[in-house]
Image (cartoon, grey):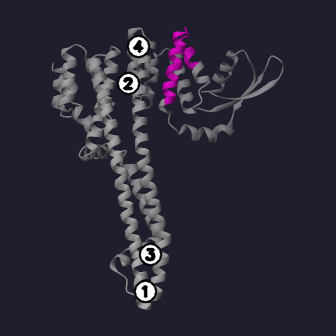
Amino acid sequence: MPYYQCRIAGEDGRVDVRSVLAPSAEECRKAIEAEGALVLSVRRDWRRLGGQGLRLGRKVKDRDIILFNQELVALIKAGYPILKSLEVISARAKNIFLKEILIRVAEEVKRGKALSEAFLPYERLFSPVYTASLMAGEKGGNLPGSIGRYIQYAKVVTQTRAKIKSAMTYPTILIVFSFILMGILVNFVLPQFADFYKSFEADMPWITRIIMSFATATSRRWYVMVAAFAALAFLLARLRRRQDFRYQMDRVKLRVPFGRTIWLESGLSLFSRTLGLLLEAGISLLSAIGIAIQAVPNAWMVRHMQVVPDHIKNGESLSEALAKAGTFPPLALDMVRIGESSANLQGMLGDMADFYDERVRGKIETLVNLVEPVVIIFMGLVVAAMLLSVYIPIFNIIRIAR
């Protein structure tokens, strides 16, 4: 969506120039005239093209989506029509990508489409859970309440992800700096000692010969390693787009001894929370289960859970269908079974999501506490090996010189 440069005449006679994002020059003129201003001219603002292209490549953050929905609920409750609410929010949206989406959604609503239908093309960005919540609110006549429940859902999911990322920040930084230190030693420090030892023509121990040979080869052929890492990163980026590769990688994740429970239980938590939200919004179990399955981030779990809707169509209960899928642990199946028997499936799903969220956070904290000493011990051993490879030949040279 392009920018247009508009010359606007104010009530005091002053001429102002404004850059406006709009679908067309005509729509830009109509939007400004609706504000009561006099438009003198409208032309394409080519200066904003480069910056716009860079900005449109970015994604909309979760907090931007939450803030947009909070403003939308407030305006609807205040009596604003949906179309006017979208126009007001898009006019002051700071994220250019979100601004463009809201303008296009407003155009679709203006043509007579429902809000959920207008957001369908952007389902990958806003998630199928969001469009399903909008549809449930429109059918039930309580759109602000349905959006409000989605806001609470999005906040919990976002906070959980943020806590997981913050917990993994320190180990990640520690590992990165460890590799940087190793790179400096191997490429700049050890090759100097290698040249020094060669000048004495002394016999070096095997550890020194191995490390010095590796350091010399790395310092001379550093561009080969950089090219290899770049090629590997490019290959992984291409492979991650393939569904079968993601399936195999997610399958491997669930076989890692300590990480298996983290990935499994985080997927169960997101599935339970999504299904509970959709059922609370009034969507049928059969429709909600398909959307909740797609919310699971693990491709292996998604593929094995695809049979759940078919079992429910055959008259089986949710707990029985999940048991046949083979992805839910016995504790989760018991909680679902209790929710069905007590006619409080939505509440039990929410409790189950909270329970597994706490377990995941606890296990991540334990993992972080284990990673820190392991990385420190590993780096200590590496540095000790390098120091031995450097100092042992020096002691041999001093002994020979004496």
Q: Closer to the camera, 400 or 241?
A: 400
* Residue, disc 4: 137
For the question of whether residue 322 can be seen, the reply is: yes
Q: Closer to the camera, 152 or 236?
A: 152
Q: Element under label 2? A: helix
Q: Which residues are magenta?
A: 63-87
Q: Element under label 4? A: helix
Percent of width and height locating residue 165? 42, 40
* Residue, disc 3: 216
Name the residue type under label 2.
Answer: Val
Badge 2: few (under 14), some or many (20 or more) residues near its Cα, within 10 Å? Answer: many
> Mark 4 or mark 2: which comes first in sequence?
2
Cα separation, mark 3 vs mark 4, equals 67 Å
Give the answer, above or below, for where 366 lies relative to 212.
above
Q: Specify the quadrant of the image occupied by residue 234.
A: bottom left
Q: Element under label 1? A: helix
Give the answer, above or below, for where 190 lies relative to 378.
below
> Mark 4 or mark 1: which comes first in sequence?
4
Name the residue type under label 3.
Answer: Thr
Dominant SS of magenta comes to: helix
Q: Indicate the quadrant containing the C terminus: top left, top right, bottom left or bottom right.
A: bottom left
Badge 4: few (under 14), some or many (20 or more) residues near its Cα, within 10 Å? Answer: many
Give the answer, above or below, for where 205 lies relative to 287.
below
